[in-house]
């Protein structure tokens, strides 16, 4: 019985020949080399990912506003409502004549609100009418001329309320955004290159980037405060934050 089993076992399994062992060894060797390469490449990439520098890039550009708006507020007060309304109508005609003489079309000046209030002073009713007209124009030079001559309205009897003033807006931001982002990116790369040079490395590609908000401010400082008039000369600014790989 034992001899028969041994004979059957010997028939089911054979010792691999030298060629088969050689092929198997080669496949195993290639697998080990490939695995080592992938592991090493992964470690290298991980190290490269850790080698980076985060810098900020700045881009600024001076622009001229292309839209001017002026909300003109004025009021009239009287113990008689019809009389107060008559004074408002007179001021409205004077304001329209003022802008017409400067060359503005009638459509450039539109009503933007009116308010009527009443209170009693020792039993005597008093009425106050407040009205607003808004000038809206793309003619910046003409708008500046109107601001320079606004005291002509006072000479015509129109008393402007506090808060009446010209406001200038730059509306073509989307036209210059791409160029400014490119400039900010170049500025950031220059900073990264200087850092890399100082540390004896080189600058690689962009790992990550964040575009900051665009801001538009008066070119010559804050405007719109008490006693400070807005100007059409603006400064557009953007700051980007970029993370560069280091070689």
Image (cartoon, grey):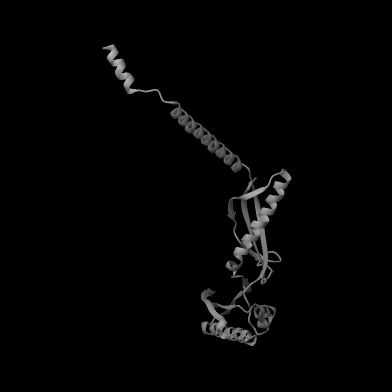
Near-viewer residue (55 or 193): 193
Extreme-top residue of the structure: 2
Extreme-left residue of the structure: 1
Near-viewer residue (197 or 78): 197
Q: Residue at x 66, y 55 (%)?
A: 57
Residue 52 higher or lower than 106, as above or below = above
Q: Is residue 114 left or right of residue 218?
A: left
Residue 112 higher or lower than 35, as above or below = below
Q: Is residue 56 visible?
A: yes
Rendering quarter of residue 239 = bottom right
Residue 232 higher or lower than 191, as above or below = below
Label total for image: 0
Q: Position of residue 236 (x, y in %)?
A: 65, 64
Q: Position of residue 43 (x, y in %)?
A: 57, 37
Q: Position of residue 53 (x, y in %)?
A: 65, 46
Q: Position of residue 154 (x, y in %)?
A: 67, 81
Residue 217 higher or lower than 70, as above or below = above
* Location of the N terminus (image quadrant): top left
Q: Residue at x 63, y 77 (%)?
A: 160
Near-viewer residue (244 or 68): 244
Q: Residue at x 68, y 47 (%)?
A: 202
Rendering quarter of residue 46 = top right
* Location of the C terminus (image quadrant): top right
Rendering quarter of residue 184 = bottom right
Q: Is residue 126 visible?
A: no
């Amino acid at each position: 019985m034992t001899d028969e089993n041994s004979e059957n076992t010997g028939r089911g399994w054979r010792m691999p020949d030298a060629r088969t062992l050689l092929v198997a060894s080669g496949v195993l060797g290639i697998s080990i080399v490939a695995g080592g390469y992938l592991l090493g490449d992964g470690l290298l990439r991980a190290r490269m990912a850790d080698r980076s520098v985060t810098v900020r890039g700045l881009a600024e550009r001076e622009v001229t506003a292309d839209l001017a708006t002026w909300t003109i507020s004025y009021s009239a007060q009287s113990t008689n409502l019809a009389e107060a309304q008559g004074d408002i109508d007179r001021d409205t005609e004077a304001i329209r004549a003022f802008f017409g003489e400067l060359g503005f079309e009638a459509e450039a000046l539109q009503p933007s609100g009116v308010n009527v209030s009443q209170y009693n002073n020792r039993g005597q009713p008093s009425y106050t009418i407040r009205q607003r007209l808004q000038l809206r124009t793309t003619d910046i030079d003409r708008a500046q001329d109107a601001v320079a001559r606004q005291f002509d309205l006072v000479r015509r009897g129109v008393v402007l309320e506090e808060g009446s003033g010209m406001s200038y807006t730059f509306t073509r931001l989307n036209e210059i955004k791409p160029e400014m982002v490119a400039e900010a990116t170049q500025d950031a790369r220059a900073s990264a290159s200087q850092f890399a040079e100082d540390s004896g490395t080189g600058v690689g590609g962009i790992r990550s980037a964040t575009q900051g908000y665009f801001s538009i401010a008066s070119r010559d400082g804050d405007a719109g405060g008490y006693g400070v008039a807005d100007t059409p000369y603006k400064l557009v600014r953007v700051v980007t934050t970029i993370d560069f790989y280091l070689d």
